[in-house]
Image: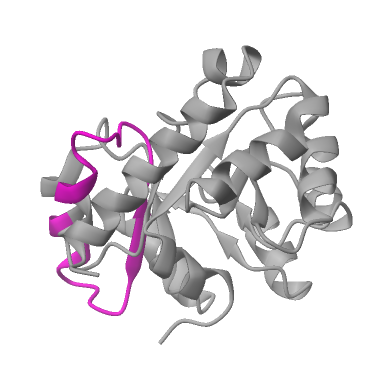
């Protein structure tokens, strides 16, 4: 049984993957996600202001915020210092993963092979990000990878959307899916918070139906 962020991921079923350029909009975006029933955010280090966004969201008590696209130890340290509750990486960087473990920061490294999965298991990790999910072979690939490793669970990210979310969630090894379709750049730049909340609500409904909540 999971504890910490992974336990909450499993409850949410979907994790918005966010690249926010307008740092002043961080609080409005968090509010939209909360109102949409998806009170979680993976803020990626694909923008210069990611640390500012994380810091603003982390001050709130109604949303779980973490850092994504963390590729260096320096970024991991910055994310931790800004209040990130978890770290997600695109690939398996031993340096970043070991730093997170040493500093008791929950981390979910990206994997797409048995080699990376073994590296995670060697470090006691049991929940990993499957990335890029669709481009790496999709559900067929994930089922094949998960077969020999029943103790592992995954968070598919990359190509997951409203159309295929339920299909991914039907895979027993899937904890939750990362996606950006309801936090796309144009929605954020145009501050369409009602639209974000509505799309988040639709995603939450898909999760509820898929898991018979």
Instruction: Say if the magenta span includes residue 80.
Output: no
In which image quadrant can residue 149 be found?
A: bottom left
State the residue lying farthest toward the right.
Answer: 81
Q: Position of residue 68 (x, y in %)?
A: 61, 43
Q: Position of residue 199 (x, y in %)?
A: 40, 34
Count the marks: 0
Q: Residue at x 84, y 56 (%)?
A: 59
Please say whether residue 70 is visible from this viewpoint: no
In which image quadrant can residue 211 be found?
A: bottom left
* The magenta segment: 143-167
27, above or below 196, in the image: below
Please say whether residue 127 is visible from this viewpoint: yes
Front residue of this view, candidates 34 and 145 = 34
Q: Is residue 103 left or right of residue 113?
A: right
Work out which quarter of the rendered image holds the N terminus and state it: bottom left
Q: Residue at x 52, y 38 (%)?
A: 17
Front residue of this view, candidates 168 and 38 = 38
Q: Is residue 168 left or right of residue 156?
A: left
In which image quadrant can residue 164 be found?
A: top left
State the residue lying farthest toward the bottom.
Answer: 1
Front residue of this view, candidates 115 and 167 = 167
72, above or below 129, in the image: above
Q: Is residue 65 left or right of residue 116?
A: right
Q: Position of residue 99 (x, y in %)?
A: 74, 63
87, above or below 187, in the image: below
């Amino acid at each position: 049984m999971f504890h910490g962020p992974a336990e909450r991921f499993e409850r949410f079923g979907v994790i918005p993957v966010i690249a926010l350029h307008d740092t002043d909009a961080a609080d409005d975006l968090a509010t939209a996600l909360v109102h949409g029933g998806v009170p979680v955010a993976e803020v990626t280090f694909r923008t210069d202001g990611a640390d500012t966004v994380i810091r603003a969201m982390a001050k709130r008590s109604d949303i779980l915020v973490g850092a994504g696209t963390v590729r260096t130890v320096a970024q991991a340290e910055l994310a931790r210092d800004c209040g990130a509750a978890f770290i997600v990486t695109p690939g398996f960087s031993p340096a970043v993963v070991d730093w997170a473990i040493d500093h008791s920061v929950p981390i979910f490294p990206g994997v797409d092979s048995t080699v990376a999965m073994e590296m995670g298991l060697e470090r006691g990790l049991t929940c990993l990000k499957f990335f890029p999910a669709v481009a790496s072979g999709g559900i067929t690939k994930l089922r094949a990878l998960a077969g020999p490793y029943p103790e592992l669970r995954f968070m598919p990210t990359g190509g997951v959307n409203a159309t295929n979310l339920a299909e991914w969630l039907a895979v027993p090894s899937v904890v939750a899916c990362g996606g950006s379709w309801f936090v796309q750049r144009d929605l954020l730049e145009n501050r369409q918070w009602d639209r974000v909340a509505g799309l988040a609500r639709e995603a939450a409904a898909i999760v509820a139906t898929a898991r018979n909540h």
